[in-house]
């Protein structure tokens, strides 16, 4: 028995018959053969009943007309042979059950053909047995011919499935008619003999042409199956590669974040401590360079966060005016410095959207417009378009060549920065914009003419004016990340840091030490536990890395440390992971999450904030320390 299966089970069937190399072309032909064989085996049993009815009818009619024993005997034997065929078919069905045909393919046609051949031989004898020489009459001849031709015609759909079946069926039937009427002789005999021959021949040709059609359609069907299987495999492969790419980027970005995180803290400490030193400008440059790398990593993190679904829009009804006012506060000084005009144009328009996310989008557009405009100005407009409002930023800048235009919203795509100078942007701002606008349920677009300017827009659903609704309050330009002394805790805090990277620990210590009463650095959970166990009440906050050298992650480690401390010590979970799953997990913990590389000032401010908020809840605090 052959184990060659259908396309779904055959291992190497990824090439279509049309372009298959010789070896696989053979396997294609083999597949067609298997399908034909299967058809024959499946179509066989239902035809036995029809054949039985035809045999009984012929034997009955001729016995009734001739009362000859030949008809009776013939009827008996042909019924017995049909019974034998049925037995064989049942046997076949048991050996090769229909649902398993794809796995167990019959080893050849003989199981079907041998019983068929035996049965068909009875049709060669039929004219002799039913109408023995000397009993001829026009009526009997006519009935005999009609019966034989009907059987021949009726068999065509079945015999067309298997080429060898055509002669096995047509020859015995034709031979019976031809020999019987040649024996009869005379004009009638020879005439009938020729008619039988012509009819048998034409039926055989017809059956063979049908067989070719079936074969071709099966071949096409197999081609399509192989092609779709190939496409399916390719799409699985693509998905796998995508997953691998994401994993690679996640781990590369995680590994990169560690040193950059440490570098950011070291450089800021250096800048602070060298404030009055001649090397202060050098320290400033180091901080600038570190900030550029941090910016890149954080932009990648922004994308990961959006992809992870952790950025959830908070829609509210907002007026466009205050939004534009905020933009003007943000960018007016820069525009003036660059000698560009910055104008705003809107009617009393309202939107229902997330104000912060929309502001990020428009900020990006205006920032780019200022970056890529040398003279002229920038116009920010809001105009209704049907049930949508189009917020657009027009500039008279460099413009974008048509070949670049379709790609500007792609990740890391930059039009004119082949040397990838980070000072000239990262090519990621518009990719984030696109994702944010998708989140807001809007559409983003661009039109541009090189050397004439560009317009970037976002279309969002309009909201009928609702003056009662809370407007987006104009706020002052955000202050640079400075240390807000109102957020300082009453006394310098005592902090425990758990991070498996020694340099990161040193960097945190260097940066935080001047603001803390005590700072303990540990790289293993066991050391951290020992510290807390020794002085359970002596830590005001923990800073814990998400990924540790221990089997536990940062969330589990925090739980252990808090248990040892006997209270919910305020904790910052710091992570360098951008893998969406881990980003989600970090947010799902009730800890304050910060991403590496953290901005040193933000780390300090957050530390103070979480300690302050705990101090405001005396029930949670072990003791109120007095300022020294
Ligand atoms: P980048 O941080 O490099 O500006 P973006 O994703 O914001 O990255 O923009 C991608 C590219 O689109 C930029 O490299 C820039 O060439 C082009 N671009 C964006 N806005 C404008 C604009 N207003 N005028 C001309 N080119 C622009």
Image (tube, rainbow, N blue to C red):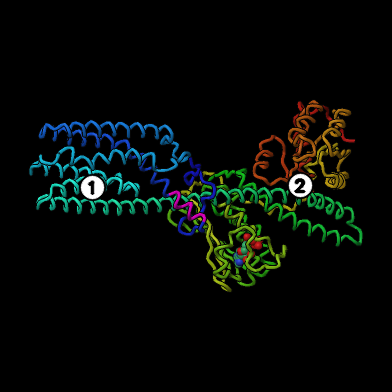
Neighbourhood count class around disc 1 (C-alpha, 10 Å): few under 14, some 14–19, many 20 upward: many
Magenta segment boundaries in residue numbering: 23-31
First in residue order: circle 1 vs circle 2:
1
Tell me the crowding category of disc 2: few under 14, some 14 to 19, or many 20 or more residues within 10 angstroms, Cα based: some
Q: Residue furthest bottom?
A: 451
Spatial CA span between label 1 and label 2 = 100 Å
Write down which quadrant ligand 1 falls in: bottom right
Query: SS at mark 2?
Result: helix
Q: Residue at x 26, y 48 (%)?
A: 171
The answer to whether residue 450 of the structure is visible from this angle is yes
Residue 271, by quadrant, is bottom right
**Residue toward you, 465 or 457:** 457
Task: Determine which quarter of the picture holds residue 290.
Answer: bottom right
Q: Residue 340, position in %: x, y? A: 64, 69
> On the rendered structure, is 133 left or right of 31?
left
User: Can the viewer see residue 322?
Assistant: no
325 or 499: which is nearer to us? 499
For residue 126: magenta?
A: no
| Disc 1 target residue | 175
| Rendering coords of residue 132 (x, y %) | 14, 39
Q: From the Cβ of disc 2, is ligand 1 less than 8 Å away?
A: no
Badge 1 element: helix
From the viewer's perspective, is residue 5 above or below residue 392?
above
Q: Is mark 1 within 8 Å of ligand 1?
A: no
At horizontal 30% and vertical 46% (from top left) the residue drawn is 168
Kindly identify the residue that appears in the image at 47 percent across and 38 percent down.
104
Q: Where does label 2 land, which residue?
A: 602
- Please provide percent x and percent y for residue 175: 23, 47
- Residue projecting furthest to the left: 138
* 132 left or right, relative to 5: left
């Amino acid at each position: 028995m052959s184990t060659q299966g259908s396309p779904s089970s055959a291992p190497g069937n990824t090439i279509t018959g049309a372009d298959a190399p010789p070896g696989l072309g053979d396997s294609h032909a083999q597949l067609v053969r298997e399908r034909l064989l299967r058809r024959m085996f499946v179509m066989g049993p239902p035809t036995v009943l029809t054949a039985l009815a035809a045999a009984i009818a012929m034997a009955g009619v001729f016995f009734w007309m001739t009362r000859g024993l030949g008809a009776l005997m013939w009827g008996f034997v042909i019924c017995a042979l049909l019974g034998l065929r049925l037995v064989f078919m049942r046997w076949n069905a048991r050996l090769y059950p229909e649902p398993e045909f794809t796995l167990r393919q019959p080893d050849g046609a003989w199981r079907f053909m041998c019983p068929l051949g035996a049965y068909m031989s009875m049709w060669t004898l039929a004219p002799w047995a039913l109408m023995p020489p000397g009993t001829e009459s026009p009526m009997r001849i006519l009935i005999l011919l009609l019966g034989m031709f009907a059987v021949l015609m009726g068999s065509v759909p079945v015999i067309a499935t298997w080429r060898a079946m055509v002669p096995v069926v047509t020859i015995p039937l034709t031979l019976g008619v031809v020999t019987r009427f040649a024996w009869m002789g005379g004009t009638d005999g020879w005439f009938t003999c020729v008619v039988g021959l012509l009819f048998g021949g034409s039926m055989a040709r017809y059956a063979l042409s049908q067989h070719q059609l079936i074969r071709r359609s099966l071949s096409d069907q197999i081609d399509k199956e192989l092609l779709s299987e190939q496409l399916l495999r390719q799409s699985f492969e693509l998905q796998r590669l995508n997953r691998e790419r994401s994993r690679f980027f996640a781990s590369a970005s995680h590994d990169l974040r560690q040193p950059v995180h440490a570098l950011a803290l070291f450089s800021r400490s250096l800048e602070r401590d060298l404030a009055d030193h001649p090397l202060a400008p050098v320290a400033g440059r180091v901080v600038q360079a570190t900030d550029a790398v941090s910016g890149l990593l954080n932009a990648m993190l922004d994308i990961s966060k959006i992809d992870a679904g952790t950025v959830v829009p908070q829609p509210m009804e907002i007026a466009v005016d205050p939004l534009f006012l905020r933009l003007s506060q943000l960018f007016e000084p820069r525009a003036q410095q660059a000698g560009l005009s910055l104008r705003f144009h809107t009617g009393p328009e309202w939107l229902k959207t997330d104000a912060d996310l929309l502001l990020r989008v428009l900020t990006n557009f205006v920032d780019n417009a200022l970056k890529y405009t040398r003279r002229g100005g920038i116009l920010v407009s809001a105009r209704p378009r049907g049930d949508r409002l189009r917020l657009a930023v027009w500039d008279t800048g460099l413009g974008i060549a048509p070949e670049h235009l379709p790609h500007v919203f792609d990740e890391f795509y930059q039009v004119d920065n082949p040397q990838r100078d980070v000072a000239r942007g990262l090519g990621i701002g518009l990719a984030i914009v696109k994702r944010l606008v998708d989140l807001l349920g809007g559409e983003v677009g661009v039109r541009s003419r090189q050397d004439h300017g560009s317009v970037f827009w976002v279309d969002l659903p309009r909201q009928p004016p609702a003056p009662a609704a809370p407007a987006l309050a104009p706020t002052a330009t955000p202050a640079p990340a400075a240390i807000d002394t109102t957020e300082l805790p009453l006394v310098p805090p005592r902090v425990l840091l758990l991070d498996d990277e020694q340099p990161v620990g040193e960097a945190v210590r260097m940066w935080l030490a001047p603001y803390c009463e005590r700072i303990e650095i540990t790289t293993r959970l066991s050391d951290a536990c020992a510290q807390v166990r020794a002085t359970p009440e002596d830590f005001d906050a923990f800073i814990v890395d998400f990924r540790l050298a221990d089997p536990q992650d940062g969330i589990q480690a925090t739980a252990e440390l808090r248990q040892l401390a006997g209270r919910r010590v305020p904790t910052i979970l710091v992570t360098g992971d951008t893998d969406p799953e881990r980003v989600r997990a970090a947010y799902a913990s009730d800890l304050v999450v910060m991403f590496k590389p953290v901005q040193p000032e933000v780390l300090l401010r957050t530390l103070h904030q979480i300690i302050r908020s705990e101090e405001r809840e005396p029930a949670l605090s072990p003791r109120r320390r007095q300022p020294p």
